[in-house]
Image (cartoon, helix red, strand yellow):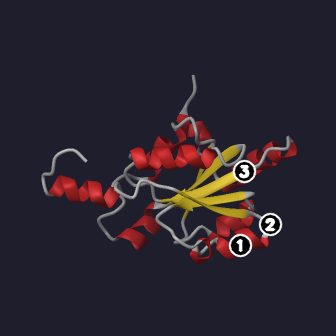
């Protein structure tokens, strides 16, 4: 029986899996984020990301890094549960958790052929990871996202008693 948790790997195991796939001529697309409350915007984005290369690796911000980025009321779900949700998606091949506020170090280690972020970013060169990606010969793509939905917007709607989003 398949278990989503088998796709959640610590960095040493992820590096082994990536090396095997690259040896077979496959290219990696990488993205990262908090994915605090998985919603349809995330799913659309991750499916589009997966179409950019042969396999998708998602770097997931740890609980402590989400709290540092979003405040003390976040994350809503633990990194263990967020990782399991992401790994349960067919479009996601691997998930790994990182503790830093940005994915620069992880990107430098993995050296993805394609690095993607959502369309809420306007200039790919403004991304903290941009220089690392480009120095390793990778390409950066900004994918159109669903800007009308976000975890913050969902939380706001719940607090305000709004109907459907």
Q: Mark 1 highlights which residue?
A: 132
Mark 2 packing: few (<14 Cα in 10 Å), some, or many (20+)?
few
Residue at 75 percent across and 45 percent down: it is 17
Of tags 1 and 2, the one toward the viewer is 2
Quadrant where the image shows the N terminus:
top right
Q: Secondary structure at mark 3?
A: strand
- Disc 1 from disc 2: Cα separation: 9 Å
Using the numbered discs, state the Cα–Cα distance from disc 3 to disc 1 in whole angstroms.
15 Å
**Residue 9 at least partly seen:** no
Is 153 drawn above or below residue 14 in the view shown? below
Indicate the secondary structure of the residue bearing disc 1.
helix
The residue lying furthest to the top in this view is 1
Is the residue under label 3 in contact with that under label 2 (CB below 8 Å)? no
Neighbor class of circle 3 (other Cα within 10 Å; few <14, some 14-19, many 20+) is many
In percent of the image, x 50 and y 61: which residue is there? 119
Indicate the position of residue 150 as horizontal and vertical percent values.
35, 57
Vertical placement of residue 89 versus 82, above or below: above
- Tell me, yes or no, whether the two marked residues, 3 and 1, touch with CB atoms within 8 Å: no
N-terminal of the two: label 3 or label 1?
Answer: 3
């Amino acid at each position: 029986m398949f278990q989503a948790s088998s796709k959640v790997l610590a960095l040493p195991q992820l590096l082994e899996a990536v090396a095997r796939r690259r040896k077979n001529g496959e290219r990696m697309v990488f993205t990262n984020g908090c994915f605090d409350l998985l919603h349809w915007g995330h799913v659309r984005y991750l499916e589009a990301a997966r179409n950019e290369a042969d396999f998708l690796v998602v770097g997931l911000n740890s609980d402590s890094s989400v709290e540092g980025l979003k405040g003390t009321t976040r994350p809503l779900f633990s990194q263990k549960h967020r990782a399991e949700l992401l790994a349960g998606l067919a479009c996601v091949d691997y998930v790994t958790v990182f503790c830093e506020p940005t994915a620069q170090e992880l990107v430098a280690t993995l050296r993805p052929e394609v690095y993607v972020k959502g369309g809420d970013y306007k200039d790919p060169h403004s991304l903290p990871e941009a220089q690392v990606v480009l120095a390793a010969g990778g390409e950066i793509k900004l994918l159109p996202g669903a800007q009308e939905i976000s975890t913050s917007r969902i939380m706001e709607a719940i607090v305000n008693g709004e109907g459907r989003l």
